[in-house]
Amino acid sequence: MVSRSELKYIQSLGQKKYRDIDGVFVAEGPKLVRELIESENAELKKIYALNKWVEENKNLSISIDVTAINEAELERMSQLKTPNKVLAVVKKFEVIEPRTKDTISLVLDTIQDPGNLGTIIRIADWFGVPQIICNANCADMYNAKVVQATMGSIARVNVIYTDLPVWLKQQSGTRIYAAMLEGKDVTKMNAIREGFIMIGNESIGIDKDLLQLANEKISIPRKGKAESLNAAVATGIILSHLV
Amino acid sequence: MVSRSELKYIQSLGQKKYRDIDGVFVAEGPKLVRELIESENAELKKIYALNKWVEENKNLSISIDVTAINEAELERMSQLKTPNKVLAVVKKFEVIEPRTKDTISLVLDTIQDPGNLGTIIRIADWFGVPQIICNANCADMYNAKVVQATMGSIARVNVIYTDLPVWLKQQSGTRIYAAMLEGKDVTKMNAIREGFIMIGNESIGIDKDLLQLANEKISIPRKGKAESLNAAVATGIILSHLV
């Protein structure tokens, strides 16, 4: 049983401004919550779960209280179309200053679709890319749809929001590769050990001020007629050739 | 101005059973509708548009009537969260028996997420893969979200629904590659000229009866910790290495 004010609080975390006030976000579903419980990086504040979930997770070592809720309460708390047994309030991850040498980083310019951002975080985790640097126009990484689409990878990839042109100018010496419709054929390039791979907005691509900072334009050769590829798909393809 | 019954009819096309009765689907938004008007494959039945769209498309040669509607009507007709100026009722594309020799085809087993299916159709179009063979458990290609996610590629890729095990057994001699978590490293394979590339369900992968038909298991090497990749992203990566 949850109080009305607690319910309202959880609902409010659907909005960025409320997540920012307390520095927390909501994670939903058994798989994600389990990953966060087992992760060293994640600090859970509260868990709300159906009895079914509590039963199924008896063996899990959980250091915080689990509040039992019913289906109706879960439905009201959840940001998802199909709420799934459990929901946790989690402290936002620490922002770690990215290391830029001897590693590959993704740089995202205005990736606005939450599903795309979440999928890109998952892709980075698959390819062992430890960090993603976003500008402020990207979707919020703690948006429910982003969190969901990361499938747990949110706890393993360092995502930073910053003023990209300013920040990139401070990273002298690290090569910047800009993903474009026209550029060097990425399928014929050798793997790289260090660099920023820059991915642009879903409709308009990379901002021209940012593009000026790039050392090399890269592209995925088109053999058919589609005008473009989805931003997350393009990121996956590029990393599969360069990592 | 549209009649109440016309409005209801358009709304009903949000459901597969009503699309199947008349063999039509709904396409939305200026970009998609324009592509369909200009496509040789697409036969438009009706267009409903805001005056704004009509003004902007005066030069377009349209052989059918355009019904002017207002924002409120568009909102009620649309299956999208953000309706966008125009909506067309389009005849479903002809189902062409796929040719399997000297070409690459995608074979989809139970791709249930409409966004994934649409994105995969767009990826096929980018890489010049002319056809996708789906089992009946895949999302319907004429679902509004699928149509949207294809970004116009729906008019250029031949998508067929069939009983996969039965159909594949009839295609003797064409190699079947199954995308798996473990298999031959796709990044080290040579491009192929002919074959079926089989992609499995988002959660459970490829059905074991189908897997038995595969000649080769292929996989995308994992360098990090994510458990899996999104099905559309995996499809894009595999095609970028094999096409």
Image (cartoon, coloured by chain):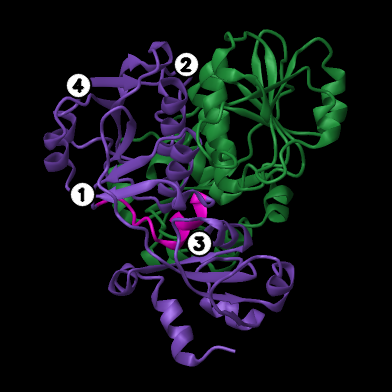
Chain colours: A purple, B green
SS at mark 1?
A: loop
* Residue A23 position in % (x across, y down): 33, 69
Query: Could you tell me the amino acid type at mark 3?
Result: Met
**Residue under pointer 2:** A223
Q: Is residue A130 above or below residue A92?
A: above
Query: Could you tell me the amino acid type at mark 4?
Result: Asn
In the rendered image, is residue B154 in sight?
no
Query: Could you tell me the amino acid type at mark 2?
Result: Lys
Placement of the C terminus of chain A among the 4 image quadrants? top left
* Residue B65 position in % (x across, y down): 46, 46
Q: Is residue B107 above or below residue B148?
A: above
**Residue under pointer 3:** B77
Q: Residues within 10 Å of mark 3 (few under 14, many from 20)?
A: many
Q: Chain of mark 2?
A: A
Q: CA distance from mark 2 to mark 4?
A: 26 Å
Q: CA distance from mark 3 to mark 1?
A: 41 Å
Tell me, yes or no, whether the highlighted magenta stretch contains residue A51: no
On whether disc 2 and disc 4 are found on a single subunit, the reply is yes
* Residue A76 position in % (x across, y down): 54, 79
**Residue under pointer 1:** A162
SS at mark 3?
A: helix
**Residue under pointer 4:** A215
Q: Which residues are magenta?
A: A137-150
